[in-house]
Amino acid sequence: MKFGLFGINTGPCAAPDVMTNVAVAAEGAGFESVWTGEHVVLPDPQEPPSPAPPLAPFVHPFTALAYVAASTSTLLLGTGITLVAQRNAVVLAKETASVDQMSKGRLLFGIGAGYLNQEFQALGIEFSERGARTDEYIDAIRELWTSERPEFEGQFVKYKNIQSRPQPHQAGGPPIIVGGVSNAAYRRALEKGQGWYGFALDIETSQTCIDALKQLRGSIDRNNSLGELEISITPRMPLTNDIVKAYEDMGVDRLILLQTGQNEEELLAYVDQIATDYIR
């Protein structure tokens, strides 16, 4: 089992020194990866399904990961998740390629379609188009990552006679890990991704999602170049040995843990506790 740490750009980790110290401690403790969350804006006042108070800080994911990359050497850097449909695909291809180059190939590109209508309204993007945009943007981004003469024409993205360098350090670009528990997300992961990510799930829901992915797999023409679908889950409950074993038995490859702690001292203690109990 690989272990990641969620929230390296939010809460106490929104402070740059805390962000760095927690990431360095996680790398030293044997964590495989750290992960950002993303909300460009939050509804004020908070209302469902918004996950956080309106003044909760979320440092821009790629800014945070580039900052962390400078202080680490082996730690993988994951976006958990990037709200692809809220972005310009060409700019996002540049951001991801740049972080992958600067980190020497350590980016894990977690993506999702988004679910807060208020964010899309603030950005002037039609909420109902988010799934179609996400699918198309993946293809448009990969074209810029990999092609010597990139060209693309879709409903939302169109370009030719351009170049965008640097391309990613990783051949083919960073692994794309698709988040979400809808049928559309499962299909997207199987058709276009190297991985699937389920956030804040209990054991029963995790099993339901994995079963749905397995059932859908038989009807999807998956490109062999994507490899086996890697499964990442953030459990909503504290870890125990029984919980870790249950996820191992399900075939989960990575647990991305929610941080517990209100300050740097508590966060560092949590990193050390997880390392002692489950990693070392």
Image (spheres, rainbow, N blue to C red):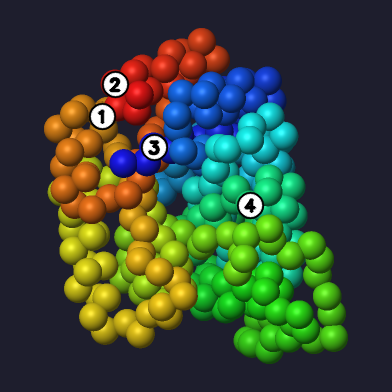
Label number found at residue 105:
4
Query: Which residue position holds label 3?
Result: 3
> Closer to the N terminus: mark 2 or mark 4?
4
Q: Amino acid at mark 3?
A: Phe
Q: Earlier in the sequence, mark 2 or mark 3?
A: 3
Quarter of the image for residue 89 reads bottom right
Q: Quadrant of the N terminus?
A: top left
Q: Is residue 231 visible?
A: yes
Q: Position of residue 14 (x, y in %)?
A: 63, 29
The tag on residue 19 is none
Q: Is residue 232 left or right of residue 192?
A: left
Query: For this rendering, which residue is in front, 55 or 132?
Result: 132
Q: Quadrant of residue 238?
A: top left
Query: Considering the numbered disc 1 on the image, is that residue within a helix, a strand or a loop?
Result: loop
What's under tag 4, amino acid-wise?
A: Gly
Question: Up-down: is 145 above or below 98?
Answer: below
Q: Which mark is residue 277?
A: 2
Residue indicated by mark 1? 239
**For the residues bearing labels 1 and 2, Cβ distance under 8 angstroms:** yes
Residues at marks 1 and 2, CA–CA distance in whole angstroms: 10 Å
Vertical arrangement, residue 277 with respect to residue 172, above or below = above
Q: Residues within 10 Å of mark 2 (few under 14, many from 20)?
A: few
